[in-house]
Each structure stands twice: as C-alpha cells, then as structure tokens.
Image: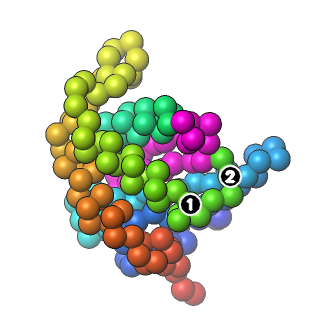
C-alpha cells in the first residue's frame, strides 16, 4: 500500500503547511499540499459546514488571484476534517506557498457578504455553510500557525519502522 498520508506519524503531526506529494502529469510537475489546520486526534475536527465554506472561499480567492489562478488545480477538504488539500502546478515547497496561503486566510477572515456560489444552482449542498465559525477557525490558524511558521510546521513527521 503506497498512500503517502498513511506513512505520516499523526501522533506527532502539528498544524502547518506540508508537501503531501509530488507527481508528474504529462510533462508538468504538480504538488499536493496538506493545509493542516488541526492536530489530528488531539483537537476537535472542523464541522462539515466549515470545511465546505473554506473550500468555497479558498477556491474563489486562489482562482481569482493574478499569479496563482493559473497554478491552482484543486482545493478540497480532507476526509478527516483536520485541514484542506490544495494542488498547485509546479515543483513547490511549503515555503513557496506560505505567502499565498497566508493571504488566502487573511482574505477569509475579512470576508463579508454571502458565501460565493452558495446557491442551489451552483452548489450541491448550498445550505451547509457557516461563515462565522469558518472565520473563527481561519483566524486561529492564521494567527497561531501561518504568521509564525516554523520548520516543524512544514516538515512531516514520518513513522519509524
């Protein structure tokens, strides 16, 4: 079984930005990032409405960004509800995206109005959003992790043996 995330020591994993995997698609490199907002099995996970709202706001911000729009392939929630996955074109490291992820979470904390595309014709579960709690979670992650990113928040702890 070769599932990268299963080789990470989740007992030691901290909140941060991690390279989950790198792949070649055609002739292009793509990098999947683990935007880890919760310490697995040690903090309560995020509600599905928060994950859903994060997905909408992150996707809108990244896909409208003048530089990162053409590099953004995918934004989506982790099944364990401890963070988000983002896939970018390029052979990238956490340090390469720390700025845009910080900008994205700053955008989310200051967002006002209706959640983008939270309408029945645009979204398969349009009622499952919670902007207030999403902003609280984004602010916590921004202030406690992104604005003080350390090596232990960017280097996966690997399982031994």
- Residue 10: x and y in percent read 41, 72
Res. 65 mark: none
- Residue 23, by quadrant, is bottom right
In the picture shown, does residue 133 fall above or below 37? Answer: above
Distance of label 2 from label 1 (alpha carbons) = 10 Å
Task: Name the one closer to the observer, 2 or 69.
Answer: 69
> Dot 1 surroundings within 10 Å: few (below 14), some, or many (20 or more)?
few
Is 7 left, or right, of 37 in this rendering?
Answer: right
Secondary structure under tag 2 reads loop
Q: Which mark is residue 90?
A: 2
Q: Bounds of the magenta span?
A: 66-88
* Residue 86 falls within the magenta-colored stretch: yes
Is disc 1 placed on a helix, strand or loop?
helix
Near mark 2 (Cα within 10 A), the count class, few <14, some 14-19 or many ≥20, is some
* Residue under the point 60% across and 47% down: 88
Q: In the figure, is residue 22 to the left or right of 58? A: right
Q: Residue at x 77, y 48 (%)?
A: 28
Residue occupying the point 57% across, 41% down: 67
The location of residue 48, given as percent across then percent down, is: 29, 41
Identity of the residue furthest to the front in this view: 66
Q: Which residue is mark 1?
A: 96
The reply to whether dot 2 and dot 1 touch (C-beta < 8 Å) is yes
Residue with the most extreme top position: 121
Q: Report which quarter residue 41 is drawn in.
A: bottom left
State which quarter of the image contains the N terminus.
bottom right
């Amino acid at each position: 079984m070769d599932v990268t995330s299963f080789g990470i020591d989740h007992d030691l994993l901290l909140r941060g930005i991690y390279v989950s995997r790198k792949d070649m698609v055609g002739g292009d490199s793509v990098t999947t990032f683990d935007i880890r907002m919760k310490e697995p099995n040690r903090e309560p996970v995020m509600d599905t409405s928060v994950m859903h709202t994060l997905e909408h706001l992150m996707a809108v911000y990244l896909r409208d960004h003048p530089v990162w729009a053409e590099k953004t392939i995918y934004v989506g929630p982790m099944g364990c509800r401890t963070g988000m996955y983002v896939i970018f074109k390029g052979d990238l490291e956490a340090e390469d995206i720390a700025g845009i992820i910080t900008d994205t979470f700053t955008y989310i904390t200051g967002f006002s109005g209706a959640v983008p595309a939270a309408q029945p014709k645009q979204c398969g579960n349009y009622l499952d959003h919670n902007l207030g709690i999403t902003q609280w979670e984004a602010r916590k992650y921004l202030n406690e992790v992104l604005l003080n990113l350390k090596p232990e928040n960017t280097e996966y702890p690997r399982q031994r043996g």
